[in-house]
């Protein structure tokens, strides 16, 4: 049985209808928490709440588009009204825009940053007044893509670099308040992110082109993420390959540039 570290705590997870959001909801429930999940696909949220309730915990599904500050405020209020408090807020909603810097349109850039960056700050502003009452935990889901870059996903990298900056700043601003900020940077984890197009629309027929041999199971990822949240880690990077890439991105950016650009040239030549 999982440790009851979050017994009778209330957790809010944005983007909670699938992938890491869903698995974190179940992991928090196993550890004693009541869980609210929000997102745009209400039927998926309701599936998750049914799974949480099957674990013996209270659950709430809240329709919410994180790009709307009003939606986020309404969601936070609805959660506290229904479940009584808020102890953990996880800003997990996001997607990835792919394409070269010169090929991605202004509209696609705006969509990427509105969801992955403004959506995070909307969630923070909505959650913090409630978290201050419980000396709770604010959690931002970043990515190793916010530490090291590769060609072809510049907008996603830009958004996750911003999330990392927000997390570092917020942890300083909250120091001494009793509220912690944990920013988590996963490596490759099974999820639906590769099946969402550049407009943020889910397409189950899209092929996930990420390297499958490096992919972590979502449930395994959720466990280590909830562990980091329980310990109030300021920043947490995982998987093994993710940590290695993050180390190189921070300390040897010239080497990363050399390896990635040469590998890309070889790949192009092979396809010619």
Image (cartoon, rainbow, N blue to C red):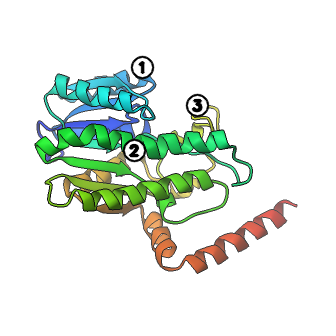
Furthest-right residue in view? 272
Q: Which mark is residue 22?
A: none
Give the residue number, with chain letter if any, for mark 1. Answer: 43
How far is mark 3 from mark 2, CA to CA?
19 Å
Mark nearest the camera among 2 and 1 is 2
Residue 122 lies in quadrant? top left
Percent coordinates x, y for residue 246 in the rendering: 46, 68
Residue 6, can we see it?
A: no
> Nearest the camera: 223 or 121?
121
At label 2, counting other C-alpha atoms closer than 10 Å, the crowd grade (few under 14, some 14-19, many 20 or more) is: many
Q: Earlier in the sequence, mark 3 or mark 1?
A: 1
Give the residue number, with chain letter if any, for mark 3. Answer: 201
Q: Quadrant of the C terminus?
A: bottom right
Mark nearest the camera among 3 and 2 is 2
Q: Secondary structure at mark 1?
A: helix
Give the residue number, with chain letter if any, for mark 2. Answer: 120
Is residue 198 left or right of 121 when viewed as pictured? right
Mark nearest the camera among 3 and 1 is 3
Query: What residue is drawn where x is 18% and y is 45%?
Result: 2
> Nearest the camera: 145 or 122?
122
Percent coordinates x, y for residue 172 in the rendering: 26, 62
Q: Earlier in the sequence, mark 3 or mark 2?
A: 2
Percent coordinates x, y for residue 240 in the rendering: 43, 66
Percent coordinates x, y for residue 52 in the rendering: 26, 29
Q: Secondary structure at mark 2?
A: helix
Query: What residue is drawn where x is 26% and y is 24%?
Result: 60
267 in relation to 40, above or below: below
């Amino acid at each position: 049985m999982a440790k009851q570290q979050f017994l009778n705590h209330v957790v809010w997870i944005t983007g909670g209808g699938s992938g890491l959001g869903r698995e974190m909801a179940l992991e928090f429930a196993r550890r004693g928490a009541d869980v609210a999940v929000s997102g745009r696909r209400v039927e998926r949220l309701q599936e998750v709440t049914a799974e949480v309730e099957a674990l013996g915990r209270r659950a709430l599904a809240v329709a919410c588009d994180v790009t709307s500050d009003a939606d986020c405020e309404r969601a936070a209020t609805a959660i506290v009204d229904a479940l009584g408090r808020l102890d953990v807020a996880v800003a997990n909603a996001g997607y990835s825009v792919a394409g070269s810097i010169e090929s991605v349109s202004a509209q696609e850039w705006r969509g990427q940053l509105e969801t992955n960056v403004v959506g995070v700050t909307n969630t923070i502003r909505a959650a913090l007044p409630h978290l201050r009452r419980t000396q709770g935990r604010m959690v931002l889901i970043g990515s190793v893509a916010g530490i090291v870059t590769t060609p072809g996903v510049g907008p996603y990298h830009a958004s996750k670099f911003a999330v990392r900056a927000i997390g570092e700043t917020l942890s300083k601003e909250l120091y001494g308040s009793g509220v912690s900020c944990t920013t988590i940077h996963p490596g490759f984890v099974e999820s639906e992110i590769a099946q969402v197009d550049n407009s943020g629309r889910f397409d189950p027929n899209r092929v996930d082109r990420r390297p499958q041999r490096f992919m972590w199971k979502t449930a395994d990822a959720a466990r280590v993420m909830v562990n980091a949240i329980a310990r109030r880690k300021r920043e947490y990077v995982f998987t093994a390959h993710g940590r290695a890439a993050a180390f190189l991105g921070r300390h040897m950016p010239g080497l990363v540039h050399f390896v990635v650009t040469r590998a890309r040239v070889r790949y192009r030549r092979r396809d010619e």
